[in-house]
Amino acid sequence: DATRGTSGDCQPCPCPSGATCAVVLTTREVVCTNCPTGTTGKRCELCDDGFFGDPLGQSGPVRACRACKCSDNIDPNAAVGNCNRETGECLKCIYNTDGFFCDRCKEGFYGNALATNPADKCKPCSCSLAGTVGRQTSCSQVTGQCQCLPNVAERDCSTCQPGFFNLQSGNGCERCNCNPIGSTN
Amino acid sequence: PRPDVHPVAPGTHLLFAQSGKIEQVPLDGYNIKKEEAKPLLHIPDRVVIAVAYDCVEKKVYWTDITGPAISRASLSGGDVSHVVTTDLQSPEGIAVDHVARLLFWTDSMRDTVEVSKLDGSQRQVLFDTDLVNPRAIVTNPAYGRLYWADWNRDGPKIEMSNMDGTERVVLVKDDLGLPNGLTFDPDNQQLCWADAGKTPLASVRDSQGGVYGSSPQAEEADRRRDPVPVRALISFGRNLYYTDWRREAVVAVDRQSEKETEEFLPQKRSRLYGITATSTQCPQAYNYCSD
């Protein structure tokens, strides 16, 4: 209030340098209006959308706001709220990835979430329902191997091992028991 | 009235979200009166995404993903209040049916399309299947219809249903990249969208509530151009206004000539999100939801 005629009429903005501020008349609350890039909040104490950190060190050491670090598995433009503004936990992983940094494949997918080409990232497990233990849909994150029932083969548990048959039983494959003399193989 | 809320003067304004605030800028005809831009609302601890306007009560509705919450305020004097605060994760799109007094929104983490009365009561989930990244949503009050876009990279699509959730159909799925913004032009019964991943602005016409399709000529022409970095758009008269994430600007495009007519760079340089227009007239309409 510059009209009272005291030395305390005008006070510096409680904002980082470069920011301007304004007083909300009813509450007399001071609000920063032009926070530095990547920061926001009444005192520029928060990180803007797409950034994370703790610019004023309100819950620990000061961490300047940095862009979300999500292993190139977010869409920085099309998506909003890509990471938690304080912890940086990634919230909008794409390409079937998951995890704090979108650094692993999500449940039901396998491959290398950190591969550069999206097509090489995470592929669906596609486990064969009949050949997989407990009809699971998840597989090994790295190899993509589904957990096969006894005598079932292939990554996706889709065929019987040589010499076995009846995958559709849902209990694994049975031995063929062919007579070696009358069989060709 | 709250002093941090600047009342909107009579006449049409653009309202757009810029992180912790909603800005207003008047239109003089179709020209943006840049020097008269000012904040409508300061919400510094929130990230405002989508904005929608109710021309009957002259209120602005918005989604914020930090609350998360859906809130509203009047254009004349504040009255800021929360409408929905529970069971929200990432509310990103919002639309108002001014005729039936309904609010629609999308949630890209719950993967839902939801509806309630304008005060948040009688809330219902309209859809919770076959949704991956639903964002933009608009209404066609005259036909009681709802349109929304899902920018799922593995199967982007624009869908339509009646406002009661019946007759859900996929309107567009071919030649889509990242369908980001949607707007409905009631004068021409035309749905326009912005595709941030592939072709720029395109549209389909709602012909008497049944036949849909995209225009082959438009698509052919569009393929030769670069994608437009659009976050949200609004159709107003002969113009489209959109928020551009590369330039951090509000851009005006003449729909007929498909030429950019104006660019408005807000004083604060940070991300722009939803945009809407507060037109002075409220289109007269009636639909089955208003019973």
Image (spheres, rainbow, N blue to C red):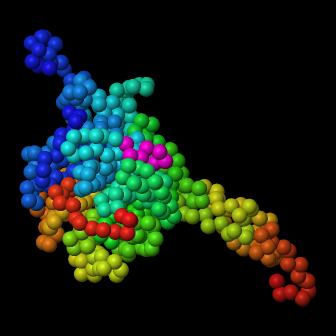
Residue range of the region highlighted in magenta in the rendering: B82-88
Q: What residue lies at 40% left-to-right and 69% top-to-bottom?
A: B162
Q: x and y percent of residue A149 in the render?
A: 77, 65
In front: A185, or A177?
A177
| In this view, B230 is above or below A184 | above
User: Does the magenta segment cover residue B43?
Assistant: no
Q: Nearer the viewer, residue B21 or B75?
A: B75
For residue A126, above or below residue B1: below
Residue at image x 25%, y 40%?
Answer: B78
Instruction: Residue at 91% x, 86% y: name it.
Output: A181
| Residue at 30 percent of width and 59 percent of height | B98
Looking at the image, which residue sits at the far front? B291
Q: Is residue A40 visible?
A: yes
Q: Magenta span has B85?
A: yes
Picture coordinates of residue B66, whole percent (x, y)? 39, 42
Name the quadrant of the C terminus of chain A: bottom right
Is residue B39 visible in the rendered structure shown here? Answer: no
On screen, residue A168 versus residue B50, left or right, reads right
Count of labels in the image: 0
Q: Residue B184: where, in percent of width, then height? A: 27, 66
Rendering coords of residue A59 (x, y %): 43, 26
Query: Along the line of sight, which residue is nearer the eye, A86 or B15?
Result: B15
- For the N terminus of chain A, the quadrant is top left
Q: Residue furthest top?
A: A6
Query: Depth check: B168 or B287 in front?
Result: B287
- Based on the displayed image, in which of its 4 quarters is residue A111 positioned? bottom right
Q: What is the quadrant of residue B235 in the picture?
A: bottom left
